Image (tube, grey):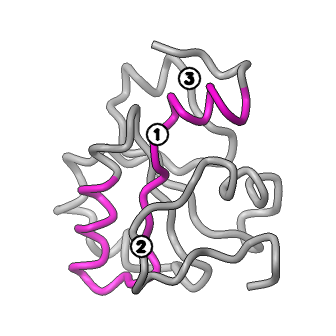
Amino acid sequence: MSGGTQLPDHRATIEISPEAVAEWIGLAPGERPRLIDCREEDELAICQITGNEWLPLGLFSISREKLSAGNARGVVVYCHHGVRSLRAAQFLRAIGVENAFSMHGGIEAWSERVDPTVARY
């Protein structure tokens, strides 16, 4: 990956800041890491980050094939506050997706620090 889409070293951390995600979120999907929203459908209806793929955390265990494919540029998962997405990133790493990260602070931090137009709840 080139400069703006560089993820942290997966051996050093499992979290990435909203600001780091904001650096590449506007790029085409094939040019940036996958962004997976692991919240529930009712939460998705309130707000979301443009360009995300939606897969609730509860479906991760039955979606291994979908989750394992297309991760050459890495994967960032987010939720409301970063707790579920941390579990999701740990799950992804456990099934062999080394370059998986949780967006620290979730969509709440995204709204506070990157895009205040994203609704908070």
Which element type, helix, strand or loop, lies under badge 2? loop
Q: Which residue is mark 3?
A: 47
Between the residue at mark 3 and the residue at mark 1, the CA separation in whole angstroms equals 12 Å
Foreground disc of the pair 2, 3: 2
Q: Which quadrant would residue 32 be assigned to in this image?
A: bottom right
Which residue occupies the foreground of this view, 50 or 110?
A: 110
**N-terminal label among 2 and 1:** 2
Residue occupying image coordinates x 61% and y 80%: 73
Could you tell whether 94 is left or right of 28 in the image?
left
Q: How many neighbours does mark 1 have within 10 angstroms: few (below 14), some (14-19), or many (20 or more)?
A: many
**N-terminal label among 2 and 3:** 2
**N-terminal label among 3 and 1:** 3
**Are the residues at dot 2 and dot 3 in contact (C-beta closer than 8 Å)?**
no
User: Mark 1 belongs to which amino acid?
Assistant: Gly
Residue occupying image coordinates x 53% and y 15%: 120
Between the residue at mark 2 and the residue at mark 1, the CA separation in whole angstroms equals 16 Å
Foreground disc of the pair 2, 1: 2
Give how far across and how far down residue 99 sits, in percent.
Answer: 46, 80
Q: Which residue is mark 2?
A: 13
Q: Which residue is mark 1?
A: 106
Q: Which residues are magenta?
A: 86-115
User: Mark 3 belongs to which amino acid?
Assistant: Cys
Which element type, helix, strand or loop, lies under badge 3? loop
Between the residue at mark 2 and the residue at mark 3, the CA separation in whole angstroms equals 27 Å
Q: Check if residue 83 falls in the magenta segment.
A: no
